[in-house]
Image (cartoon, rainbow, N blue to C red):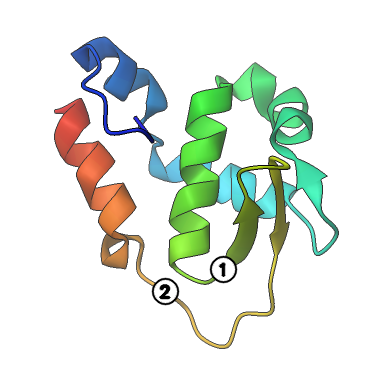
Amino acid sequence: YRRGETLPKAYYQRMCPHRADLVSVYQTVTNAPVSISWVCDRLGGKGMNRCRARMCADIFAELGLMSYDAVTDRVQRVPVKEKRDLNESEVYRQILALAQ
């Protein structure tokens, strides 16, 4: 997905976060950097998978709510000045469309 490759529709559906997934990731990640694996360990029982967790991190990073380093695979919250609408995220809109 990140390399622009076309994937089977079922992959997009497994990667696409629901609103509840986004809320869970946001509540789980703190101001200290944590790995995507750590997030998955905490939320695995709620159906979270690595691709979905990374997608959440990409969405939050685009909205300026978190910082995400794909090289180190670490995410952390950043100070938020104002509430953001998830639909402002191009990444979110794109994955929603691909998962349909």
How far across and how far down the image is residue 36, in percent? 69, 35
**Corner quadrant of residue 35:** top right
Task: Look at label 2 and name its amino acid.
Answer: Arg
What is the quadrant of residue 78 in the picture? bottom right
Q: Is mark 2 on a helix, strand or loop?
A: loop
Rendered residue at 32%/15% (across/down)? 11
Going 67% across and 18% down the picture, which residue do you hit? 45
Q: State whether residue 93 is above or below residue 63.
A: above
For the residue carrying disc 2, how many other residues have a C-alpha within 10 Å: few (<14), some (14-19), or many (20+)?
few
Residue 29: assigned label:
none
Locate residue 31 relative to residue 11 in the image: left or right. right
Q: Position of residue 26 (x, y in %)?
A: 62, 53
User: Residue 56, how many percent across, how many down?
Assistant: 50, 45
Nearer-N-terminus badge (2/1): 1
Instruction: Please indicate whether residue 34 sits to the left or right of residue 85 in the image.
Output: right
**Which mark, residue 65?**
1
Q: Distance from label 2 to label 1 (Cα)? A: 8 Å
- Residue at image location 55% in from the left, 19% down from the top: 47
Q: Residue 84, labelled with which disc? A: 2
Left or right placement of residue 30 versus residue 69 in this view: right
Residue 46: image x %, image y %?
Answer: 60, 23
Residue type at the position of mark 1? Leu
Identify whether 96 is placed above or below 93.
above
| Mark 1, secondary structure of its residue | loop
